Amino acid sequence: MKETARVVVIGGGVVGCSILFHLAKMGWKDVVLLERDELTSGSSWHAAGSVHTLSSDPNISRLQDYTISIYKEIEETSGHSIGLHETGGYYLASTPIWHDYLKRERSKARSMGLEQEFVSIEEVVEKHPLINPEYYVAALWDPLDCDIDPSGVVYAYAKSARVHGAEFYTHTTVLETNQRPDGSWDVVTEKGNIHAETIVNAGGLWARELGRMSGVHLPVVPMEHHYLITDEIEQIVNLPEGQRLPSCIDYEANFYCRQEHFGMLLGTYEPQSTPWSLDGTPLNFGHDLLDPNLERIADRLELAFDRLPAMASAGIKNIINGPFVFSPDGNPMLGPVPGKKNYWVAVGVMAGFCQAGGVGRTIAEWMIEGEPSIDIWAMDIARFGKFATPQWGVVKSSENYERRFVMTFPNETLPKGRRQKTTTLYDRLTQRGAVWQPSFGLENVLWFADSPENAHEEPTFHRSRAHDYVAQEVQAVREKVGVIEIANFANHKFTGKGVRRFLERVLAGRIPSQGRVNLSPMLRESGKLYGDFTVACIDEETFYLFGSCVVQNMHLRWFEENLEGVDDVEYRNMTDDFHGMAIAGPNSRELLARLTREDVSDEAFKFRDIQDTFIAGVPALCVRLSFTGELGYEIYVTPQYQLKLFEEIEAAGEDLGLKLFGGRALMSMRLEKNWGVWTTDFRPDFTLAESGMDFFANWDNNFIGKAASLKEKETGPGKKLTVLSIDTETDVSGDEAVMYNGECVSYVTSGAYGHYVGKSLAMSYLPVELCQDGQALEVEILGEFHKAVVVQRPLYDPTGAKMR
């Protein structure tokens, strides 16, 4: 066995073998995979083998599409059969609501260039005669869906990796992973030690135990999962030679099925999940199964047998109950672990044979080229922080398992694992009628009802009962004054003599002078966006960067990576140490004046000033800035002062028309100002010029990504972030197709109703030739094409006079 390697991948399932293959194929030959037993031991060998492209996140769908495309290559390269059956697949809707869901998915597929289409139920029955048509109202057809031999795929990846120069060792249990002072790793095994620059935890069922060896706690949980295989079914036996039944997913009945030889494979996700082996996966578990318990899925089987009657009379040949790993939100957890140098993970890949090819390519691109080719935030390990404890992981992973085929509506928040993190105002705001949602584990307010009893809304694709409440909040901010909690902004603190020099390299924007703030984008070397911040200079050795709370760990990882070798800068993520309130509206200056002894006149406290001061009798940082587009102030305090600050604001603003508002109102108001937000409109799929963030660039500085951005500046971007006004009473929620002359030209990145301007608004990256004001387009919403026009200037206060 080798003694050194550039990368050691630990885990010989489909994910680990795909990573090994892609690293070697892309040029890194000095890579090794270690497997404690045989390849496929764990979850891979007993997987159902169904493969599809449909996913809640479009970029995950793209990676699933790639996974399917790579299968023939690895079969040819390795000479090992993968048992591929290209059958296509049906997604079946048995209710109008599920039909609406499929309409949304079809629109997303349209924007990605995937060839999904609705077909008649008669056509479904013609190709799949086992289906009882009386239960279904619609069917979506995907020609790419297929099924494979799981073991064959794993061995094809591994053998293809070997062809490209990689090595793998079976029956090589990892006993320890010990990090050296330089950040490299000693991987201790039963057969000797390997010194590796980087290790990748692709441990599957053993990912938790492997992580704990290095002090990494992963909130993934093995779940028991049943599927069964029937005896021969006459209709299948009598199919013309070479013809196979398409695969099917029935969302309401919660089952998936496909042909298996001359019978059927049927799987389901129990309404009550069964986490397995919470204390740790036994080391001697390999090609093993768990005892089946059909009582747990009896109700689902009854539904399935009604909808595929031939299965009811067929005997059951095999019952498989095997564990596989779920993450808290059902998506993979990939990438370098924040705070742990040279330690990567690729875990929680529940749909391994749909996603492993894309996962392998993503990891290889990230390691070799410095970043993935597309935005993989939905799979980034950095989306979880310290709040994602093992216990929380059990609760959320169980919920996600139980909801595997249950749609989540755009306005819906899931109930389990809530109140993991709260601020001191949680109970107070709940009493005021707050409706909450979690963001990076922290509860933050969506909107306020008029009482706790009315603080609810039904999940829907359409406007909910919250609509009028949000309208009142927007009106209050626009005409009087509103207050919102701002604990869900990230706060990064940099100190030291070299801070300005460091920030001028890491950020693309202008670094402010003392007492001032500026807006600045942050880029990767490719010129693609990697953040946008409000940069505040307290003094020449103290700077704060305020940004998106959700991606704070992603940014922490990036800052720490770029601080390597920098001795005169210290960095701390201060997000949990700074909570606060923001006030906005025409009366906000008067409200602030009542809370402080400082002069807050326009001359003394200018737009984009920051003051380290006292407000409401407590120490505070106050920034004259507001994301509402109004005159406003953000007031940051340490958590122990937040309650006092809130009480004083409420008391002082009572006669000024003060009203509490939440995130929905904020998102409505920012759309009225044509402002994008991080993770939707601004993300690593887009560049500085495409996003319009080049307005803030300081071309005199040698910032990361400057070379790529200058090249784009010379040639001009091919698309630009643009606002659309849509003629609709059902607002967009994201990923809807944007059409021009019958062709899909883009998709919606975000949208909502602009309550003050009375328009349904959306943002989209449009081809530059379509970005003229008033350009007519269409947006597909729930299967209907709605007229839309480009809005180049903000519909509200286009000159920005009010906020200045």
Image: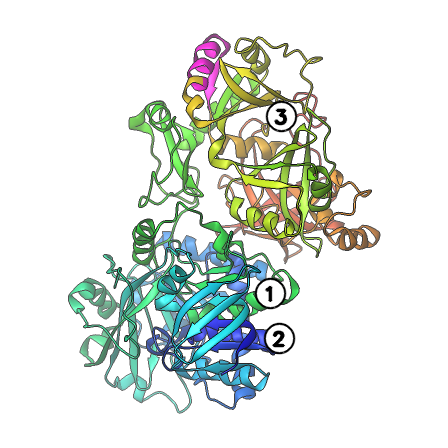
Q: Is residue 291 left or right of residue 599?
A: left
Q: Amino acid at mark 1?
A: Met
Task: Say which label, 3 or 2, has the lower sequence index.
Answer: 2
Q: Residue furthest front?
A: 181
Please tell me whether residue 572 belongs to the stretch shown in magenta.
Answer: no
The residue tagged 2 is 28
Query: Of 121 and 414, which appears nearest the observer?
Result: 414
Look at the picture and state if 791 lies above or below 279: above
Q: Amino acid at mark 2?
A: Trp
Q: Quadrant of residue 274?
A: bottom left
Stretch of the chain drawn in magenta: 645-660
Where does residue 196 sit, x and y in percent of width and height?
54, 70
Q: Is residue 785 visible?
A: no
The residue tagged 1 is 367
Q: Is residue 539 left or right of residue 698?
A: left
Where does residue 208 sit, x and y in percent of width and height?
36, 61
The residue tagged 3 is 625
Characterize the magenta stretch by its predominant secondary structure.
Answer: helix
Residue at 47% x, 25% y is 661
Judged from the image, the secondary structure of the residue bearing numbered disc 1 is: helix
Judged from the image, the secondary structure of the residue bearing numbered disc 3 is: loop
